[in-house]
Image (cartoon, rainbow, N blue to C red):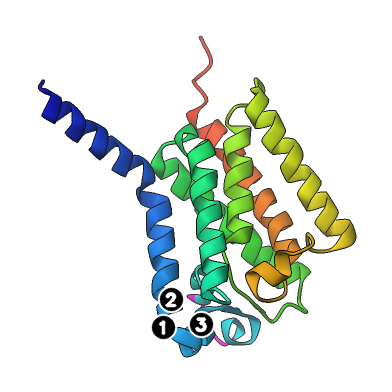
Amino acid sequence: MGLRDLNENRKNSWLRGWWLPLIFIAASVLTMALGEVGQEMLRYDRVWIGQGEAWRLLTGHFAHLSWSHLALNSAGLLLVWFLIGSRYDQLTWLMIFTITLAVMNLAFWFLNPELYWYVGMSGMLHGLLLAGIIARAPRLDAESIILLLLLVAKISWEQMAGPVPGSETTSGGPVVVDAHLYGALGGALGALIARIRVKPPAAI
């Protein structure tokens, strides 16, 4: 194998490892490019979901309040993926993503009936990060322990005191802190299911 082939393999390997977050970001850019009308058509909206517009359960997590909100979430996704993206294969990540969104949507619907609309990837990011941390359990390295402590501290602060100072200004609107809690719970559930799926059979 020549140097050119080696570089090509590295490039393909990088693309295989990053195609999922890049698709998420591309979907978010597309929904943002549709403008205010597009956001209203795609956001999580309790009234319209109740009338059968089920696609909002997915697209609401890719719609954003503003370009700055999108940039913030995209940067967060890329950072999270850099830290923990290699801890599962892409299909397992897709399963975890699906479970995370399902838990968030169910929790919104049954636990937060006062929540009429929601947009953004922040809840999903909390879920993916926690799932990546759990992948190292029970032998967590120092990096995973630090990430876990920071995540638990952030969610605890939000549940007791509200949004982290400056987060609403940065995102350009109100922060639904319960989305972060529900996303983390969904990510944890997805990670546990992933561990069960790959658990080797017991010896006979």
Q: Position of residue 22 (x, y in %)?
A: 38, 55
Q: Quadrant of residue 161?
A: bottom right
Drawn side of residue 148 relative to residue 84, left or right: right
Alpha carbons under labels 3 and 1: distance apart: 7 Å
> SS at mark 3?
helix
Q: Which residues are magenta?
A: 51-55
The residue type indicated by label 2 comes to Thr
Does the segment drawn in magenta span residue 171?
no
Residue 91's place in the image compared with 3, above or below, is: below
Q: Position of residue 1 (x, y in %)?
A: 11, 20
Q: Are marks 3 and 2 in contact (CB under 8 Å)?
A: yes
Label 1: few (<14), some (14–19) or many (≥20) C-alpha neighbours in 10 Å: some
Alpha carbons under labels 3 and 2: distance apart: 7 Å
Residue drawn at 12 percent across, 30 percent down: 4
Residue 168's place in the image compared with 140, above or below, is: below
The residue type indicated by label 3 comes to Gln
Q: Position of residue 91 (x, y in %)?
A: 40, 44
Where is mark 2, residue-wise?
Answer: 31
Q: Is residue 61 visible?
A: no
Q: Are marks 3 and 1 in contact (CB under 8 Å)?
A: yes
Mark 3 or 2, nearer chain start:
2
Q: Are marks 1 and 2 in contact (CB under 8 Å)?
A: yes
Q: Which of 115/26 is in front? A: 26
Where is mark 1, residue-wise?
Answer: 34
Alpha carbons under labels 1 and 2: distance apart: 5 Å
Where is mark 3, residue-wise?
Answer: 39
Label 2: few (<14), some (14–19) or many (≥20) C-alpha neighbours in 10 Å: many
The residue type indicated by label 1 comes to Leu
Residue drawn at 84 percent across, 53 percent down: 157
Residue drawn at 81 percent across, 58 percent down: 158
